[in-house]
Image (spheres, rainbow, N blue to C red):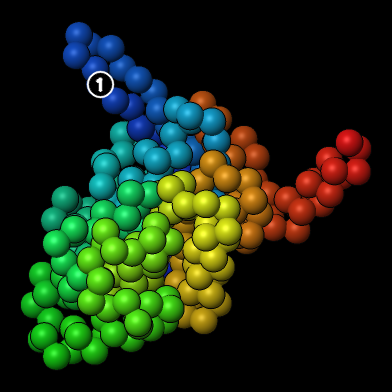
Amino acid sequence: MSKKTSQTSVKTVDLVKDFNLPGGDVVNVLTGAKIEVKPGDFVAVMGPSGSGKSTLLNILATLEPLTSGDVLIGGINLKDTSYKEQLEIRRAHSSIVFQSFALIPYLTALENVKLPMKLRKVPDGEAEEKALKHLESVGLYGRLNHLPEELSGGEQQRVAIARALAHDPQIIYADEPTGNLDTHIGKEIIQLFRSLTKEHNITVIMVTHDSDSAQQTDRIYILQKGKVVTEKTKSESKKTRKKGDAEK
C-alpha cells in the first residue's frame, strides 16, 4: 500500500485515546471524537482544559498513537500504518507550529527556517532560496539575520510559520499559536494562516482557547469530555455571537 496521501483531507471516526497510569489506572482522554476537514480548510478545535484538544492534534500529527477508531489523513488510515510509515507521512506532508515558537536560540531567523531542509539534505543553495521566499511571505525579509531574542513574539511566531512552510506541507497543525501573543499580533497571525489556506491551499488545523481567533476559521469543533459536542461553521458562529450581543 502506497503511503503517499492523495489529498489533504483529515477525518476521524470514533477516535479513542486512553492513557495508562502507574498502578493500572486508565485516563480516557478521547472517547469517540469525530471531525472531518476538507483540503484547504482552516479549522479550530476548542474546549475546556482536559477535553482532549492537544491530544487530538498530536494524534493527527502522528506524534501520539491512537487507542482505537480511525484516523484518515488523505485517505490513509493511521491504524494501518507502522511507526516508520507515520514518520514518513509527517515529514512529507505536515508541519507543526507551537505556542512556544520552538526556535533554536543560537540560530538566526534564516538559519532556523533552513534547518529542517538541512536535516532533509536539501542542497544549501536551494534551502536558502526557499527560506528567503518563506520569510518574505511572512513579512520578515528585513529580519533574516536576527536571533530569536532580538525578535518580538509575533516575529518569532512568523519565523516558526516560515519554518513550517519549508518543505511545502499540505497540512499545518497549530497548537495555541497565538497563546503567547497580544490580541493585535494574534490577529495578524490568524490572518497569515488564512492567507495560507486561500493562496496555497494548505489545510490548517488549530487548537485554540481564543474564541475571536476561532471565529476567523471555516469551522469550529468544540470538544467536551473527549467528544465533539458542537460543530459550527464560520457563518453560524458569527450569528450566535451577534445574537448573544443583541441579548445583552
Residue 78 visible at all: no
Relative side of 166 to 107, left or right: right
Residue 157 picture location, percent across and down: 38, 61
Counting the numbered discs, the total is 1
Residue drawn at (69%, 58%) of the image: 234
Residue drawn at (46%, 80%) of the image: 200
Residue count near mark 1 (Cα–Cα under 10 Å), binned few <14, some 14–19, many ≥20: few
The residue lying toward the viewer, choosing from 96 and 113, is 113
Residue 170, quarter of the rendered image: bottom left
- For the residue marked with disc 1, what is the amino acid? Asn
The residue lying toward the viewer, choosing from 132 and 173, is 132
Residue drawn at (44%, 34%) of the image: 52
Residue 138, quarter of the rendered image: bottom left
The residue where tag 1 is placed is 20
**Residue lying furthest front in this view?**
150
Residue 115 picture location, percent across and down: 16, 70
The residue lying toward the viewer, choosing from 118 and 231, is 118
Relative side of 60 to 149, left or right: right
Residue 140 picture location, percent across and down: 38, 77
Residue 69, quarter of the rendered image: top left
**Residue lying furthest top in this view?**
23
Rendered-image quadrant of the C terminus: top right
In this rendering, is residue 10 above or below 125?
above
In this rendering, is residue 242 above or below 103?
above
Rendered-image quadrant of the N terminus: bottom left
Relative side of 70 to 33, left or right: left
Residue 58 picture location, percent across and down: 33, 45
